[in-house]
Amino acid sequence: MEKITEYNTKLLMNLAKNGDSEAFEAVYCRYFTPIYRYILCGVRNREIAEDIAQTVFLKAFKMIENYKDNGSDPAPYFYTIAKNAVIDHWKKKKDILYGDDPERVNTISDVSKNPLEKIEDNEKAQELMECVGKLSEDQKEIITLKFICDLSNREISAYTGKNEDAIRQLQCRALRSLKNILKTTHENK
């Protein structure tokens, strides 16, 4: 199967806008995992994240005629719908984002590790996500988009509307803050 590139994705979105459901299916396959991970960071529950991710793509499909090809990757279109879906979820739940439920962001098992290493990795991931939860909302969003959704600074810029220099500065400050939070956490143990 041909690798889906930014150009192909834009083409597929335009085909989907013109009624090609197979094109939308290919776009769905391209974006489901990063959108799911983004949502998982926001709701911290796998089942809820899966439900919301499905809702995101259903909304995107239903509203495809509103999609405007502005010449860039369509990822911000999906991330915007996902962000609004997560906000709507919490408005309904009135819970706190990054709560006490320690769900793991990366759930794919690594068969090369023994069970003890997996437990240690899960504990480290839980600790890291708890520390990320202590960052400002802007910093959490940048860290999530950059390191969990694996977006480039250009893609993050398109999604957030901030220029790439601002993204780099925010990312640098977030990583510095995260380092200090981790250091404080380890000193208190």
Image (cartoon, rainbow, N blue to C red):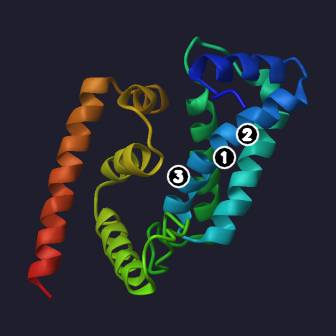
Q: Quick one: SS at disc 1?
A: helix
For the residues marked 3 and 1, what is the alpha-carbon distance in whole angstroms?
Answer: 10 Å
- Identity of the amino acid at label 1? Phe
Left or right placement of residue 137 versus residue 72 in this view:
left
Residue 97, position as x, y percentages in the image: 47, 66
What's the residue at 58%, 22% (across, down)? 6
What's the residue at 40%, 32% (across, down)? 152
Quadrant assignment for the C terminus: bottom left
Left or right placement of residue 155 versus residue 84 in this view:
left
**Circle number at residue 32:** 1
Residue 10, position as x, y percentages in the image: 66, 19
Residue that numbered label 3 is attached to: 38
What's the residue at 37%, 80% (across, down)? 117
Residues at marks 2 and 1 touching, judged by CB atoms closer than 8 Å: yes
For the residues marked 2 and 3, what is the alpha-carbon distance in whole angstroms?
Answer: 15 Å
User: Which quarter of the picture shows residue 177?
Assistant: bottom left
Q: Quick one: SS at disc 3?
A: helix
- Identity of the amino acid at label 3? Tyr
Which label sits in the foreground, 2 or 3? 2
Residue that numbered label 2 is attached to: 28
What's the residue at 42%, 33% (across, down)? 156
Quadrant assignment for the N terminus: top right
Foreground: 70 or 148? Answer: 148
Q: Residues within 10 Å of mark 1 (few under 14, many from 20)?
A: some
Q: Quick one: SS at disc 2?
A: helix
N-term mark: 3 or 1: 1
